[in-house]
Image (cartoon, helix red, strand yellow):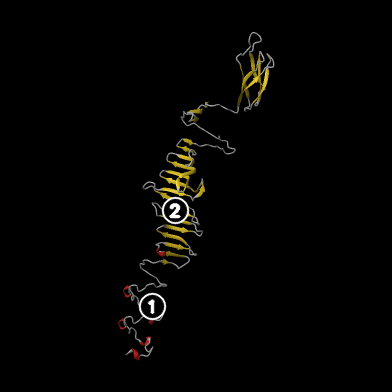
């Protein structure tokens, strides 16, 4: 039968016996896609196992979109995998960058797993980064503007060591725009200090340093010589260029400053030493004996001199002296400055026959002098309150 003797559509599918047309009766390329109706070949018309890898030419399926179904037991090399084309989705190897990216509903990348580490971004834009690309991983917390952030990191100062650092974000202070606070747990020491971010030899501010044998608290300024003020406990107390201000709790019954001797102690309770003078200025021993190298001034002691000119020979004459002392009982001591004490002979000599004090209060007294003539007499006085 020649094809030229067949009327179009004279041979329909129902006039062909089942399996009458076999693969060997169809010339190569006799059936092309333009000869097939759309959707004419469905999964139900393909026998199981009839199409395998050997039946498909190399690159037989290229640049095509496969919709629905499953891909099982396959190896996919190259390209990009994604859960959606836009919006909320997960992508793998996007842009051939070998990374996992998580997008929110607005299409903003909020998470990443890559060679750089693990990154997460919140709805505000703030980020957390866990970066393993160092001797030890570090964790960074960054603001939404990506202009500042805090870091937790581990530093290997010596081979095998793991020193933990906690660093605040930077701020302006002490004449610099990049100061920060750092807490550092090192090889058997711990420090909290205020440093410059890119020049960590600059330390300005309060500082705590603790190790196995001591604890140091105080103020440090490495930019200005002589400004450090610290207290060191190890196990005694050493205060270096510091001033102590003791302010007890209002209404408290305890002493503002309390010093107690230790068992078997033989040294002083208090010693004040002047390095320039190479000597002790004040000492208080265990028995309470005090030694003061300088001048003692006390609120209950007042001293001075007064000059009194007798109104007549052999006539006691007084002068009012003013001062201010504390104490419930005030006692006075007076002494004349003279080379002729006592009565002289013959009569009419210039001896000082006596001095005294009366009307003694916390702020004044009368000083008296009596002598054999009217010569002005200097009298030294002292009052003590108790």
Which residue is found at the position 32% from the left and 90% from the top? 2
The one nearer the camera, 266 or 350, is 350
> On the rendered image, what quadrant is the N terminus found in?
bottom left
| SS under mark 1 | helix
Front tag of 1 and 2: 2
Please determine whether, in this image, residue 54 is positioned above or below residue 219. Answer: below
Which of the two residues, 95 or 44, is positioned nearer the viewer here? 95
Disc number for residue 15:
none
Residue placed under numbered mark 1 in the picture:
44
Q: Is residue 269 visible?
A: no
Q: Is residue 68 left or right of residue 379?
A: left
Quarter where residue 371 is shown: top right
Q: Number of numbered discs present?
A: 2
Asked if residue 352 shows in the view, the reply is: yes
> Is residue 306 left or right of 69 when viewed as pictured?
right
User: Which residue occupies the foreground of this view, 291 or 374?
Assistant: 374
Whether residue 126 sits left or right of residue 307 in the image: it is left
- Spot occupied by residue 20 in the image (x, y as percentages of width and height): 32, 85
Numbered label attached to residue 139: 2
The answer to whether 379 is drawn above or below residue 160 in the figure is: above
Quarter of the figure with residue 213: top left
Q: Is residue 293 above or below residue 223?
A: above
Q: Residue at x 38, y 78 (%)?
A: 44
Label 1, residues with CA under 10 Å away: few <14, some 14-19, many ≥20? few
Q: Position of residue 52 (x, y in %)?
A: 33, 74
* Residue 273 locus on image (x, y percent): 49, 30
How far from the left and from the top, in percent, is residue 329? 63, 25
> Sequence order check: which comes first, mark 1 or mark 2?
1
> Which residue is the extreme one toward the bottom?
5
User: Are the residues flagged by discs 1 and 2 in contact, CB closer than 8 Å?
Assistant: no
- Tell me how far mark 1 sits from mark 2, CA to CA: 55 Å
Q: Quadrant of the C terminus?
A: top right
């Amino acid at each position: 039968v020649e094809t030229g003797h067949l009327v179009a559509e004279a041979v329909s599918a129902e006039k062909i016996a089942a399996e009458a047309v076999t693969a060997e009766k169809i010339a190569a390329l006799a059936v092309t896609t333009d000869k097939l109706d759309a959707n004419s070949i469905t999964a139900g018309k393909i026998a199981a196992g009839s199409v395998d890898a050997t039946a498909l030419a190399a690159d037989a399926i290229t640049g095509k979109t496969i919709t629905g179904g499953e891909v099982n037991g396959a190896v996919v090399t190259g390209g990009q995998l994604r859960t959606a084309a836009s919006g909320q989705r997960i992508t793998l190897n996007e842009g051939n960058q070998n990374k996992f990216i998580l997008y929110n509903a607005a299409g903003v990348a909020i998470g990443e797993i890559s060679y750089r580490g693990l990154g997460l971004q919140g709805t505000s834009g703030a980020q957390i980064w866990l970066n393993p690309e160092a001797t030890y991983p570090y964790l960074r917390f960054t603001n939404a503007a990506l202009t500042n952030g805090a870091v937790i990191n581990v530093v290997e100062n010596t081979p095998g060591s793991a020193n933990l650092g906690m660093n605040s974000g930077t701020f302006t202070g002490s004449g610099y725009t990049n100061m920060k606070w750092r807490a550092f747990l090192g090889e058997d020491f711990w420090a909290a200090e205020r440093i410059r971010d890119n020049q960590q030899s600059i330390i300005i501010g309060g500082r705590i340093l603790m190790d196995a044998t001591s604890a140091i608290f105080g103020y440090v300024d490495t930019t200005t010589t002589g400004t450090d003020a610290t207290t060191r406990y190890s196990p005694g107390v050493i205060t270096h260029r510091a001033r102590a201000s003791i302010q007890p709790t209002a209404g408290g019954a305890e002493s503002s400053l309390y010093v107690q001797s230790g068992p078997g102690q033989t040294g002083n309770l208090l010693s004040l030493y002047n390095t320039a003078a190479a000597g002790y200025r004040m000492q208080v021993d265990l028995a309470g004996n005090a030694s003061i190298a300088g001048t003692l001034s006390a609120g209950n002691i007042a001293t001075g001199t007064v000059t009194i000119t007798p109104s007549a020979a052999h006539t006691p004459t007084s002068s009012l002296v003013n001062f201010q002392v504390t104490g419930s009982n005030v006692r006075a001591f007076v002494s004349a400055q003279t080379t002729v004490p006592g009565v002289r002979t013959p009569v009419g000599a210039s001896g000082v026959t006596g001095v005294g004090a009366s009307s003694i209060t916390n702020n004044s007294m009368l000083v008296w002098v009596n002598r054999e003539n009217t010569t002005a007499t200097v009298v030294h006085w002292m009052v003590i309150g108790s």
